[in-house]
Image (cartoon, helix red, strand yellow):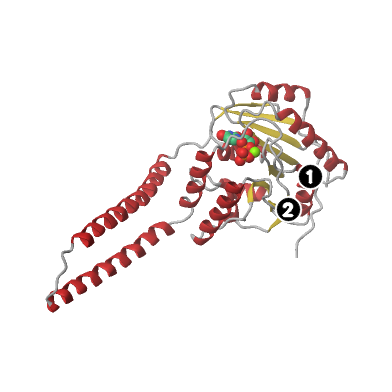
Amino acid sequence: MLLSRTRIPRLGLILPAYNEEEVLPTTLDVLRKIKAELIEQQMVRSDSFILIVDDGSKDKTWSLIQQQEQQNRDVVGVKLSKNFGHQSALLAGMTESIKLADIVITLDADMQDNPDVISQMVQKYLNGNEIVYAVRSSRKTDTWFKRNSAMAFYRVAGWLGVKLVPNHADFRLMSRVAVQALLKMPERNVFLRAMVPLVGFQSDKVYYERGERQAGKSKYPLKKMLSFAIDGITSFSIQPIRLLLHLGILVLGFAGVEILYTLFEKLVGNPTAGWSSLMISIWLLGGLNLIALGVVGTYIGKIFTEVKQRPLFQIEREDGYPTQTTTNHE
Ligand code: UDP
Ligand code: MG
């Protein structure tokens, strides 16, 4: 049975933003309206806030955030010293927000994550969940390629033992305990959607229709998406190495059969010229060797980055934290 909570939480909405000057003003308007409704319904505290992480933008994103901070007490800006990438920006946002907020919701700055489900997410938290995943109810706004490649990704990931919530990206609610647990993970290859389910806790899902980007361009070109998917899998599964081992055994078995066959041909006294089988063997084994080297190399690359223990983000400055009110909402 889920507990119903009686304490009204302070909510922090986290937006990672990389060159989002075109869409940010609209997004803030929409989110502010939603936040006001939640406050009115006494679902979140009146000092709830929106925290924007400027992930090293080169456009006017930061000056826009500063402007917002001056005009409104409910906006917090965090500027990273360079572009650290979406996942690290989210982690930076969570690290900072959780100092103030009881619950955080991460969502994209371009309004593709439909903010209309935010109140359902908060409701699920109030019902006793620590994590609420927003899941896409359909992928009809995606291109054929994106839809099918995503499906293949979830299939392969599941097959290799990576626990993911299908069709969920980074639109989610997390309570303070869940965030604190997540922040204890020391890894450098951050793939939040696979890390969050690892922390456990009571969780639930809400469903939403993912919209079109409201303005500006996607920051995830195909190349980046592909490396994100490969990273996601190789950071959470050593299954590919095991598969290699199995493949090795199978190949060895084939070699055994070949030897037996050759012996048999010798005994019968009818040996073949062997030119084609020789060529095929060389090419086949050469290919297998290369694949093996590639996979092992990927893991060595990971060990390399983990060992270096580079910080995931470096905050250049932060200001505009809303003042903490002393009102007791218990
Ligand atoms: N983003 C970021 N750093 C990056 C790339 C993207 O903070 O290096 C942010 C971006 O501003 C947006 C979110 O991550 O708020 C998702 O990016 P985008 O909408 O471009 O991805 P898509 O929806 O096309 O997959
Ligand atoms: Mg987007």
Left or right: residue 136 versus residue 87 is right
Q: Residue at x 54, y 58 (%)?
A: 155
Q: Residue 249, position in %: x, y? A: 31, 66
Residue 305 % position (x, y): 41, 41
Q: Is residue 183 visible?
A: yes
Instruction: Find numbered disc 2 in the image and state the secondary structure of the residue it sits on.
Output: strand
Label annotation for residue 21: none
Is 66 rendered above or below residue 288? above
Q: How many marks?
A: 2
Which residue is at 58% across, 34% downward?
219
Dividing the picture into quarters, in which one does residue 325 lie? top right
Crowd tier of the residue under label 2, counting other residues whose Cα lies within 10 Å: few below 14, some 14–19, many 20 or above: some
> Residue 161's spot in the image, x, y percent?
51, 60
Rounded to the nearest angstrom, the CA distance separating label 2 from label 1 is 11 Å
Q: Quadrant of residue 20?
A: top right
Quadrant where the N terminus is found in the figure? bottom right
Q: Position of residue 19 (x, y in %)?
A: 62, 28
Given the image, on which type of amino acid does mark 1 rest? Answer: Asp
Q: Tell me if label 2 and label 1 are in contact, CB under 8 Å.
A: no
| Residue carrying label 1 | 116
Q: Nearer the viewer, residue 111 or 187?
A: 111
269 sits left or right of 50 in the view: left
- Residue at (49, 36) in percent of width and height: 311
**Residue type at tag 2:** Tyr
Is 321 in front, or is 59? 59
In this figure, which residue is indicated by the disc labeled 2?
207
Which residue: 68% across, 37% down? 213
Query: 100 above or below 185?
Result: above
Label 1 Cα crowd, 10 Å radius (few <14 / some 14-19 / many 20+): few
Left or right for 298, reference 62: left
